[in-house]
């Protein structure tokens, strides 16, 4: 048994020594540049039709709060989408609307062409942001 352990230990040490000295820290010279490859096919252009509309220090009241958003076109209404966000002006965190508390919706969004309505169950001054995205 001792012989097997000694042989295994010697083999392990020899392996570590061999690996230590077989690797070089120096890199060789950089070889010549290869030939240019063929051009690929052009991809489909992405969607850059995103508009952000900000209302700073808006006084939300209980009930309906209407925002005139002329950027909300019929095309966006039919085929795009609108994200709504709110934050306390003293904070740095934007919350996505709808905002709920214990399963009860506190603030929700209703959109129509040219208008966004926020239905609120509280009074508060808030920054409101609408992000409008048209389809491709």
Image (cartoon, helix red, strand yellow):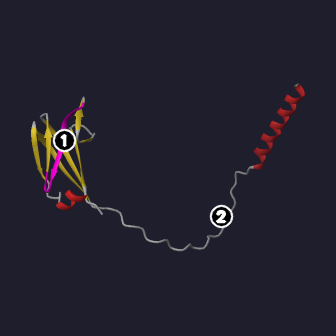
Q: Can you tell which quarter of the image residue 64 is in? A: top left
Q: What is the crowding at mark 1: few (fewer than 14 residues within 10 Å), some, or many (at least 20)?
A: some
- Residue at x 66% of width, y 67% of height: 31
Q: Secondary structure at mark 1?
A: strand
Tell me which label, 2 or 1, sits earlier in the chain: 2
- Residue extending farthest right: 3
Q: Where's the C terminus, which quadrant? A: bottom left
Q: Which mark is residue 30?
A: 2
**Residues under labels 2 and 1: Cα distance?**
60 Å
- 57 sits left or right of 22 in the view: left
Does residue 83 lie above or below 75 as drawn? above
- At 68% from the left edge and 57% from the top edge, which residue is drawn? 27
Is the residue under label 1 in contact with that under label 2 (CB below 8 Å)? no
- Asked whether, in this view, residue 131 is left or right of residue 60, the answer is right
Q: What number is the disc on residue 108? A: 1
**Residue that lies at the very extreme toward the top in this rendered image:** 1
Q: Position of residue 86 (x, y in %)?
A: 21, 42
């Amino acid at each position: 048994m001792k012989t097997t352990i000694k042989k295994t230990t010697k083999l392990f040490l020899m392996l570590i020594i061999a690996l230590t000295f077989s690797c070089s820290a120096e890199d060789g010279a950089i070889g010549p540049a290869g030939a240019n490859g063929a051009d690929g096919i052009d991809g489909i252009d992405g969607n850059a039709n995103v508009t952000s509309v900000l209302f700073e220090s808006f006084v939300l009241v209980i009930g309906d709060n209407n925002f005139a958003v002329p950027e909300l076109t019929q095309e966006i209404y039919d085929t795009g989408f609108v994200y709504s966000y709110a934050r306390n002006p003293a904070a740095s965190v934007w919350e996505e609307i709808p905002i709920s508390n214990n399963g009860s919706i506190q603030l929700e969004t209703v959109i129509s062409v040219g208008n966004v309505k926020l239905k609120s169950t509280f009074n508060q001054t808030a920054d409101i942001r609408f992000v409008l995205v048209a389809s491709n």
